[in-house]
Image (cartoon, rainbow, N blue to C red):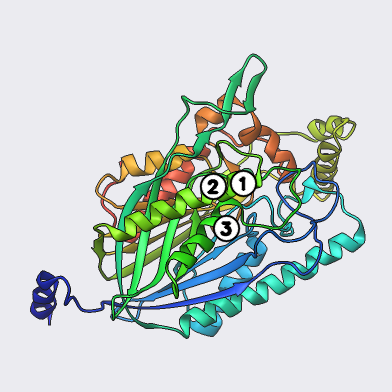
Amino acid sequence: MKKIVGLLCVCGTLMAAEFRAGVGRLRITPDGPIWMSGYASRNHPSEGVLHDLWAKALALEDPKGKRVVIVATDLIGLPREISEALAARAQKQYGLDRSALLLNSSHTHTGPVVRPNLSTMYDLAPEQDERLKAYSRKLSEDLFTVIGAALGDLKPARLAFAQGSAGFAANRREFTSKGVKIGVNPGGPVDHSVPVLQVTGEDGSLRAVLFGYACHNTTLTGQHYKISGDYAGFAQSELEEQHAGAIAMFLMLCGADQNPEPRAAEELARQHGKTLATEVSRVLAGKLEPVRPPIRSAFRIVELEFAHHTRETFEKEATDSNVARVRRAREMLKAYDERRPVRRVPYPVQAVRFNGDLTLLALGGEVVVEYALRAKREFPGEKLMVTGFSNDVMCYIPTARIIREGGYEPVDSMVYYGQPGPFTESVEETVFATIRQVMSRVGAKGGK
Ligand SMILES: [Zn+2]
């Protein structure tokens, strides 16, 4: 059998379908006005819809029956509560191992709040809060449905991979005399790569394309009140128009310290979406390398440690003029009262490897770009797609250097995420030690 497959591979066009693939999609646009996530400055619910939000799933199965399901969502970030309950249900219903379910969020800032993450960012009237709770409940059902739809759609398929590039992501950590501010830092690290996974049917037609980019979906700023997936939403709908019958899925990579440039207008979100879609189509039309079985997957939760804090830290903060800080301080004092001060947060790290032809390294949280750059340096022999915003978005994940530098990502954002403060500088090495563990478990070559 091995010989025959080898022979067919040489023939190229006659290559056998080595996987089975299935896709599913569900519209997850909120019905009616809802509080939007991403900007603390928003003061009223959404006003209409620019385009729909989607949950999309791609199920892949190798010849030995090993399955993975990758889920892409046009959302700010899935909380652990939703992801873990969903994973437990998928395990029970479909026998899907936790390591074989990858849940990513595009981090659109023009979508609904997804409770309970970013809880301190908003102080909402009970009616708004109730709407968000109802949305989360329906979302959990929809995600379960879309996973089932993809698994129920498995048909022979071939996979291939290649990378392109797009230049609109800019490092946003601008160094000023008053410290690091959100702006534009032309000399800062970026990762402009656009990884593209092509899924074709036996007849050679495109069934799905999975692509990613490391850049915040923040072309649309806090003054925009129409629901949309920002540039990633436009890119996906553009690709689905260009390739009728195929599903286009965007995965957010390590774009936590990256903003689109220029930004702050609807036309620019459309433009960046078009730029990305055009690049993905160019890659699809070029030479892609075959992606072969087997599939292997690994998943680990590690605890990340916060810098030391005391009760006094938050007693002082409770009198602050910033309402979000006061809300954070109250939550932390409550935790002290209950003798469970928040010292650590659980952090998911996942790897899904297809032979040596492609490895998805999926990290939780808002991961800054240097994690992806370092992972690529540590695993030079691997074709890596490093996604952030996967399985849980509990806060930003800065490097040790960024923690020392300060600014929004390592310090101020923790207020809105309801976390006690910055991480210790050990966070970067803890995450990399865990990355090496999951990478080794899926057979990846490299790691210091
Ligand atoms: Zn963000």
Image coordinates of residue 114 in percent, x first then y, are 71, 59
Question: Which quadrant: the N terminus?
Answer: bottom left
Question: Which quadrant: the C terminus?
Answer: top left
- Few, some or many residues within 10 Å of mark 3 (<14, 14–19, 20+): many
In the rendered structure, are the residues bearing label 1 and label 2 in contact, judged by CB atoms less than 8 Å apart? yes
The residue carrying mark 2 is: 271
Q: Quadrant of residue 65?
A: bottom left
The residue carrying mark 3 is: 233
Image coordinates of residue 135 in percent, x first then y, are 75, 68
Q: Quadrant of residue 341?
A: top right
Instruction: Point out which mark residue 267 bears.
Output: 1
Badge 3 or badge 2: first in the primary sequence: 3
Image coordinates of residue 299 in percent, x first then y, are 46, 61
Q: 138 or 394: which is nearer to us? A: 138
Q: 347 or 291: which is nearer to us? A: 291
Q: Report whether 275 appears left or right of 86.
A: left
Q: Amino acid at mark 2?
A: Gln
